[in-house]
Image (cartoon, coloured by chain):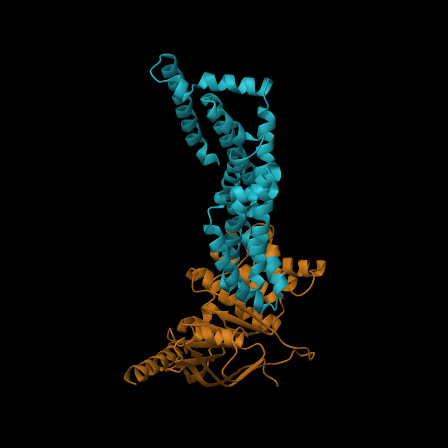
Chain colours: A orange, B cyan
Amino acid sequence: MENRLEVSHLSHAFIKANGEEIRIFQNLNFAVGAAEIVAIVGRSGAGKSTLFNLISGLLKPSAGKIALGAREDGSAGSIAYMLQKDLLLPWRTILENAVLGIELQRPVTTADRSRAKDMLARYGLESVANAYPHSLSGGMKQRVALTRTLLANPTVVLLDEPFSALDYETRLMLENDVISLTRSEGTSVILVTHDIDEAIAMSNRIVVLGGRPAKITREENIVLTVDGSSAERDAVTARGAPEFPQFHKTIWNALRASDVAHASA
Amino acid sequence: MKKSNGATLIVTTILIVLIILWQMAAQANLINGQLLGSPIGIFHSAVIGVTKGQLLYDTWVTLVETLLGLVVGSGLGIGLGLVLWFYPRTSDIVEQFSILLNSIPKIALGPLIIIWFGSGMISKIWLAGISTFAVAMISACAAAQEVDKDLLNLFKSFKAQRMMIFKKLILPATIPWIFSILRINIGFALIGAVVGEFIASENGLGHAVFVAGSLFDLNSVWLGVVILTLMAAILTWVVQLIEERIVSWKVSQ
């Protein structure tokens, strides 16, 4: 398979304690290609986080398949994720936190450590490599979490509202970090968010979830013209693209339509 | 610690003032020195106890009983509580048992334990240990289960083995809890050891207090109480020092 991740005919349901079945998803189909950012948006309660847990393998789906594509060299792909909470371990230094993903697999080598230091330096964190998380700001902690996610060398990165607790400026910077990462490393990203602006600014494609059980109500390819020419977008220029308001309207209407349909059902 | 310096000064001053008032009242015969003792009388008892009696040895005996009971009882309890993290189903059953065990007034087991293990130090170590075991196990088990589920999921997403999760997450995350269990258990261990000495023994501060009490030597009773209090305070302080060393990431916050 060419894609990094393929979700096919995915359905999922919870069985409540009284035996009642709560259906969450019905027949979801979508794919994520290499170096692509796919945003999944839906109103709260649409099961975005459940989808996230299904894709990351923390939950087993009731039906359907989630297939992970191989790397270019044929070895198995892998998924790493990042949440709104930074989940740094307070008893570990920044560097030790960054290499956690490696350490849980195999002994950490000097090469791993210098790679981690390089990556921390890229995010302006070299001076705090030996500090403990409590001395860092929220934005810095999220960058450490991003570093930890990336050092595990994933082919697909899952982001569950990773920046929603940050101030606007820090948020734009981190959005840029993720966008540039897909370009430099070819990593694929699935972004789960309720923020339409963020979804349009960052992603190549938006998948809208709606209804109950949730279905894909719309899939929209996001192509933005930035700075008039072929210049590549970043978190700021994307928001200034002429197509931005139209996409915003389209996605907003798609979300609202599924709400209305749900309310009248 | 820095913040509490002012409070420590105030507490010390109040204590000194109270002791002086106590002594003055006893000398002026405002209170019955025979029935209440007096600070100078306590001091006399201490001097006599150290020079002619076996006060130092008694202190040593009680200290050893308390420490061994604390370390063995809490150690086993904490160890078992943490290991139960691997077996969530078993842990439910064991937890029920330990709640039952914990509701036994441990002191009431004193006569049994003394019959089984004799009137020497071993029976007091048992009593001190039993007094701390169940609390330690229940708390350690709860602490291990209360580790953030998102952190657990993060470790699972990195495909960590259960042993790795235990070593790198559960253990470090529960260390602050383990120290607070130890601090609480100092008091329980001390009660276990002293009550054991009350029941049957030839040595120890509990024994000394008991004998002094039956001889109406109230100054010596007070002396025992003061030494026991100091012992608990010093042990708490030592545990705190060790904690500050190990949990330095937390202290520096």
Percent x, y of residue B23: 40, 17
Foreground: A242 or B163? B163
Foreground: A63 or B209? B209
The single residue placed furthest to the front in the displayed view is: B115
The single residue placed furthest to the left in the displayed view is: A264
Quadrant where the C terminus of chain A sits is bottom left
Decide if residue B10 is in sight here: yes
Residue A1 left/right relative to A237: right
Picture layout, residue A107 above or below residue A32: above
Percent x, y of residue A52: 49, 74
Q: Residue at x 57, y 53 (%)?
A: B172
Picture layout, residue A148 above or below residue A216: above
Percent x, y of residue B37: 42, 20
Foreground: A216 or B220? B220
Residue A103 left/right relative to A254: right
Q: Residue at x 65, y 64 (%)?
A: A102
Decide if residue A136 is in sight here: no
The single residue placed furthest to the right in the displayed view is: A110
Picture layout, residue B143 above or below residue B56: below
Count the labels in the image.
0
Which of the 4 image quadrants contains residue A188? bottom right
Percent x, y of residue A75: 68, 77
Quadrant where the N terminus of chain A sits is bottom right
The single residue placed furthest to the top in the displayed view is: B28
